Image (cartoon, grey):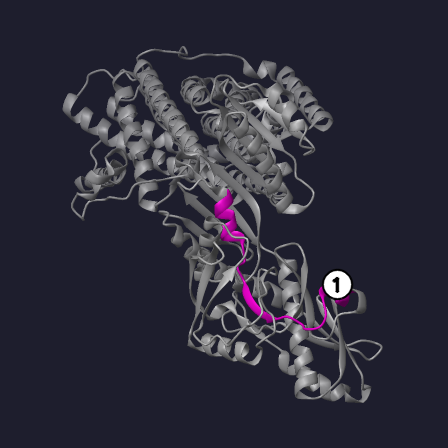
Amino acid sequence: MKSSPIRAVLIVLVALMGVLFALPNFLDRDFVNGLPDWLPKQQMVLGLDLQGGSHLLLEVDREAIITERLRDLRRDARNVLANQNGIGNIITTDEASATITIELTDPSQREQAATALAGLQNTLSDALFAGVGVDELAFGQAADGRLTIALTGEGINQRMSALVAQSVEVIRSRIDELGTTEPLIQRQGDTRVLVQVPGFDDSDRLKNLISQTARLTFHMVYPGMTAAQAEAQGLPAGTIIVPTQEGGAELLYEDVSLGGESLVDAQPAYDQQRGMPVVSFRFDTRGAITFGQITSANVGQRFAIVLDNLVITAPVIQQPITGGSGQISGSFTTASANDLAVLLRAGALPASLDIVEERSVGPSLGADSVRGGLIAGIIGGISTVIFMLIAYGVFGVFANVALIINVLMVIGALSLLGATLTLPGIAGIVLTMGMAVDANVLIFERIREERAAGRSIIASIEAGFSNAMSAILDSNVTTFIAAIVLFFLGSGPVQGFAVTLALGIMTTLFSAYFITKLIIERWYGAARPKQLKVQLVKFVPDDTKIPFMNWRKAAITASVILSVASLAWFGIHGLNLGIDFKGGTSIEAQHQDGPADPGVIRQALGTLDLGDVQVQGFGPPEDLLIRIELQEGGPEAQQAAVDRVTDLLTAENYEVRRTEAVSGTVSSELAMTSTIGLSVAVLAILAYLWFRFEWQFAVGAVVSTLHDVILTIGFFALTGIEFNASSIAAILTIVGYSLNDTVVVYDRVREFMRKYRKVPLVDLLNRAINSTLSRTVLTGPTTLLALLALAVFGGEVIRSFVLSMIFGVLVGTYSSIFIAAPILVYLGLKERAEPQAVEAKQADGAAV
């Protein structure tokens, strides 16, 4: 019963480290900053859903990159052939195949032209294989003799990857100009950039600052011909038509006379003569010289300033400008002039970025979420503590001490990792409190069983811990697998939940076994009790002999009927898919003068001609949830629709508290990754259980888990609860919880198969389920109490997640008894049990 002093010190040190790293989260920030440097000071970062802010997921526009690169390639090819070699040519572009085709005016110059064009090859470094180059261009010759240059797929991908890396730095520079604290800017894959700015809820301004390319170029205006004449007569060689800010168009030379990369400063200013905001700029030395040369050589000509393929202004050069500075004038407001100056100072994005996902949360909603999460956590924790005290008395005190240390270790680990705490993350902590007692319950129940079997107090405690570890380890590993899949499957808040759940599993294993055992050891050494009363109140009588297997046919028949009905209802009515899967925009608003009136808002929105718009109550009577379908016309049309709805809500005295927008691309990806993730989780768990048990156990666990998933999907379809990204998190958590229950039963079945060799399988299964019934009855309520606290106080945002979890806990408990165990009979486990018994008997004889 005595641990070595070194082992005890290590356990205490680990627990103290967890507590120390957790403490800064409960102290004032100024007080924490005043602590000695050797003490932990890092606090958990609150997610956007808890402190408000904006979340944007941006994607590099592949088509725009191809178009831009083909335009540059066409210009370079024309210059190489015409200017350097005097070869006449006609170049056409096919963006669909990312190819330009060159028709020579003199076919006899084909070999010379091909040799000259080969010099355009660009070798890009491959991000996956350092030092290995990727050819960007593929040269060829069509059947009619025309030369072709195509962009290779590898080259496009590598260019996109490089552009994303450059975009991250440009975006960081722009956001730094805003003076916000702790923004998160990181790349996701080869094509996307994630931006989260806490405390900044002006999502429109943030989008304009981030997504605007801000590519500034200077072009000479083509003289003697307007854009309309060029469209009618044909474009002169080397020219392009560019729209103007006023709605017209200008005919410009395609060659860039000067680029914005030469800018060293840009500041908002005010033109006193014209009485309007402008943006003044200044070039570097090289740019100033070039600018002076251009303006000196083209006095009397028009010079266009183009920003993101839009002519801002095209004044006539009155005189040479040699000072290296100038100004951009247009229809600017003071705010837009300031934002343009920020964009120009930070530099242009190397590629255009499309917003594929947007989430914005107001500070008032964030404060409500924090308050609701704390209340749910306190109530869930107190209810769990009281339940354990009632059930186990002194041993309940030991479990509660371990539980408190467990929660502090989770918070400390999140702080140490610099993880972001989200509302689903709080739900993960509350759920951990409910599920964490499971390990202690398993240990305490095994101690009771060993004591009832006649062992001494010391032997019962030792055997209780050692014999329970197999079930504890197996059940938690299966849940951990689900958490890992959830982390890689989800994003944002869902990942926050996965991290919290995974950390909770690891700290639970540590606290339940090491800390609880250390406490009991020290208690026993000091008290030396003559009797060991583990359980204070018996919720399940000892030696129950409920004939569960007698009801197996009825239970399986009922489950098959319910499963078929769930699938049929799902097939007919489908799910109430959230914008995570459908795409579109969701707006949560709160009325400032009493209860909201969905009918009035629904009628008003009907006049906006936005397609399918849903208006419904959402939580408190003052709140409304408005969903807008994806608009034709892309992100610009979607944003315009959101602006119109927001203006209408503001006019009706509503405060917009949360906005979420998801593109069709992201929603379809989520549907695919969700399917893959669930499949991977089930296969990984199947493999683990097959390794740890016989194949019948693995198949039985998967069948019972699929049963729970199907019924949960039927629950979503029947109730009409919104099915969104958090619902996937709920299903995977249900998978973990259901398997937790199932593995506990299976572990006892495996143990009894070795212990009772001649007992018929049906009786053995009954005995195994009855022996774990006390644990099932004690663990289920603690989890349900925590979930009920979340359902009542956690807020509407995670209510669908919590309600589905409550249903899943009930179904998972049922399936572990009435599906997972009986199915072993039909999978032929009985035939495999007999030779195992013979082998065990032979082994016993050899040992004697």
Q: Is residue 64 magenta?
A: no
Q: Is residue 229 magenta?
A: yes
Q: Is residue 281 above or below residue 495?
A: below
Q: Which residues are magenta?
A: 204-231
Nearest the eye: 679 or 344: 344
Horizontally, residue 105 falls left or right of residue 428, namely right
Q: Residue 752: x and y, percent? A: 46, 26
Count how many numbered circles sit on residues in the image. 1
Residues packed near mark 1 inside 10 Å, few (<14), some (14 to 19) or many (20 plus): some
Q: Please tell me in which quadrant of the rendered image residue 47 appears.
A: top left
Q: Residue 462: x and y, percent? A: 29, 29
Viewer can see residue 443:
yes
Q: Which residue is pictured at 55% across the width and 53% down the height?
A: 331
Q: Which residue is pictured at 71% across the width and 88% down the height?
A: 86
Q: Please tell me in which quadrant of the rendered image residue 251 appears.
A: bottom right
Q: Is residue 207 above or below residue 786?
A: below
Q: Amino acid at mark 1?
A: Ala
